[in-house]
Image (tube, coloured by chain):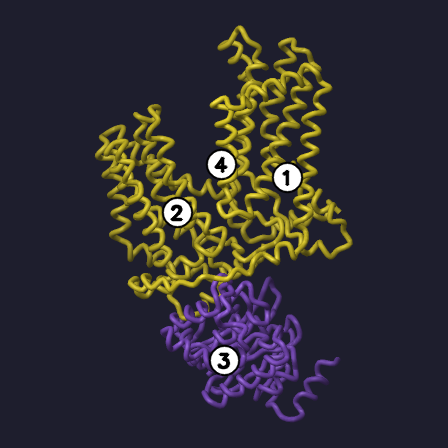
Amino acid sequence: MIKYFLNFERKQFLRSSYWQKSIAINILMVFLVLYFILMFLIVGIGLYPILKKQFPESDPLIILNGFLFYWFLSDLMMRFFLQKLPVMNVKPFLILPLKRSKIVHYVLGKSMISFFNFLPLFAIIPFGIILIFEDYNSTKVVTWILFMCVFTLIINFLNFIIEIKSADTELYFLPIIAIGTGLFGLSFFEIIPLSVLFEKAINSVTEQPLLIWVPLLILIGLYYLNYTILKQKLYIDNTLKVKAETAASSDLIWTHRFGSIAPFLQLDLKLLWRNKRPRSSIFMLVIGLLYGLFFYPNPVYKEMVPMFVFVGVFLTGIFIINFGQFIPAWDSGYYKLLMSQNIQYKEYLSSKYTLMLMSAIIMFLLSIPYVYFGWRILVIHFAAMVYNIGVNIYILLYVGSFNRKRIDLTQRAVFNYQGTGVVQWLVGFPLLLVPMGFFYVSYKFLSFETGILVLVILGGIGIVFHEKIMKFITTKYLDSKYKMIEAFDQKS
Amino acid sequence: MIKATELSKEYNGNMVLNITYLEIPKGQTFGLVGNNGAGKTTFFNLMLDLIKPSTGFILNNQIQVNKSEDWKPFTGSYIDESFLIGYLMPEEYFYFIGELNGINKTAMDFFLMQFEEIFNEEILGNKKFLRDLSKGNQKKVGIVAALIGNPEVIIFDEPFTNLDPTTQIRLKKLIKKITEKSNATILISSHDLGHVTEVCERIVVIEKGVIVKDIKTSNETLEELETYFSV
């Protein structure tokens, strides 16, 4: 049976129109994967000599074990935002003569073959081999490697539970942040010395190989917990009964001052507010706004002015990146309607432009208090806003005309955790790094003022030629109209 | 009103539609009948410029649909649920379509009053999103939305499926009323031979993309069609 499941998934992947269009992203992903493998290998090989040199008195293995708690926390956080949970459309299988348990085991099993579970091995195994060469007891080393594997899987299933649980909540990333900072706080302020407890636990396991049963039992327990949670979700009424929420209507009369784009603007605002996935991009604004607090107060970054440009573009552009990269896929569910109605593409796109423009301006205004950390930051934010408005929005709108992946806003399928993945963040990087590069070059060779001027001028050019650029983008959309309709028609 | 010339659609060497010539005069109620895969929806998609013809073209009121978009203001259509916006309430959806057609809220409320019978109190004022309505009720919304702006050409793909018996009868009444009152050209496809023969003045049967029968509806039509399809 599993053979079939795997086969279905391969077909779903290869036969979706998305695959053909996103080869560039796939290549980028491969590079990223290779990069991380290399990094972990270097760490695995280099860690022992480095630790030995820095701390000749202590045992490198013990030192490493002391950091296990932080490994645990960062791995958990990373996975939450980057690891995609296995998505499977289970409804067609429910009526087939198939045990429900089999479907659940399959989904859980699939989550184990994630790249995130293999990556640590590239560091763990070389490190272990070096330990053996350094005359460590080989049973001890093997137990340690085994423990680390179990440990990785524990994180895997823990993340699975957290993601399922928080997928039902409104601010899906709040629980993980609360858990992460909570645990970190408990340990850091030594209320509960978690990091010491972790260290002691693993040290005793390596001393007493039989104790490996303890983490194994924890793993089995987590697996079972996952299993019961998922099995409960395997009934369609569980998801169908999902509140037929009564809607609050609002007239959004203020949008009328925008003239002909008003109906689209209203539609976009409702889209943002009434669907879970786009709504999360509104909440992202809060994260974006607080992002500066990581950098500005930190003396380490005091002299790294170009880094502030990165923060500025991110802060004023977070909505642009999150919302803009899925234009026009947000409307994919009713794209045919839009295409057969009496509308102009230009107005449709202008509405999206206006929305992103407003977000950039609002974010800039809200970020004014950062002036506390120096007037330069305010100037940088302003330049970043102008750059976002004059360059990044157009880039995303233009790239949107190549968008071929349907977003199902209404889908309530079980196991649908369609959402954040690595790709979503990858797309943002060029948008953030390019302006930083422009600034860096002019800042390094000329001055701070020139750097700012370059960004403002680049953005200004875009703003001045708004009509021309929009016209160009509109023709691109018209050109790919049929392809988009066809692709958006493909479910899953 | 509508003219299709040398119209064909091919997918990977597979001819799904091939119409040498088809003319539908203004004011006609036109029924399109055929088995699955005969090309009914393909024809409608071509009419709405949602897919590109392999050869030939369609003229809608002298306007070639894949060259100009000027046919949109006087053409109303409902093909499937992908014409609905799930996160809107029915009223908001109607207002949105209305605004695109230059109809304000008050005029829209007045327009919707005439459909009270069809809505049967299940659509308006229930504060439900379209995605939470049943399939039948979604269809009612789509059909009424297609009539907004008094279009001269109306396209319905399978309007009777998913509707309850009462609404089916009411919809037939409504279509007849539109043909009497306005001079709109109505194109309907259906699998229910009874319904089409009752509503349409003319019925065209297509099979594997080719027109095989073109009948002016009379008392014998239903029987004729039933014999044809019972092979």
Category of crowding for the residue at label 1, using alpha-carbon neighbours closer than 10 angstroms: few (below 14), some (14–19), many (at least 20): many
Distance between the Cα atoms at labels 4 and 3?
51 Å
Q: Mark 4 or 1 closer to N-term?
A: 1
Chain for numbered disc 1: A
Q: Is residue B8 left or right of residue A9?
A: left
Q: Which structural element holds mark 3?
A: loop
Q: Nearer the viewer, mark 3 or mark 1?
A: 3
Label 2 – label 3 distance at C-alpha: 41 Å
- Asked if marks 4 and 2 fall on the same chain, the answer is yes
* Element marked by disc 4: helix
**As drawn, which residue projects farthest toward the bottom?**
B219
Secondary structure type for disc 2 = helix
Q: Amino acid at mark 4?
A: Ile
**Chain on which label 2 sits:** A
* Chain A: drawing colour: yellow
Mark 4 = which residue?
A: A177
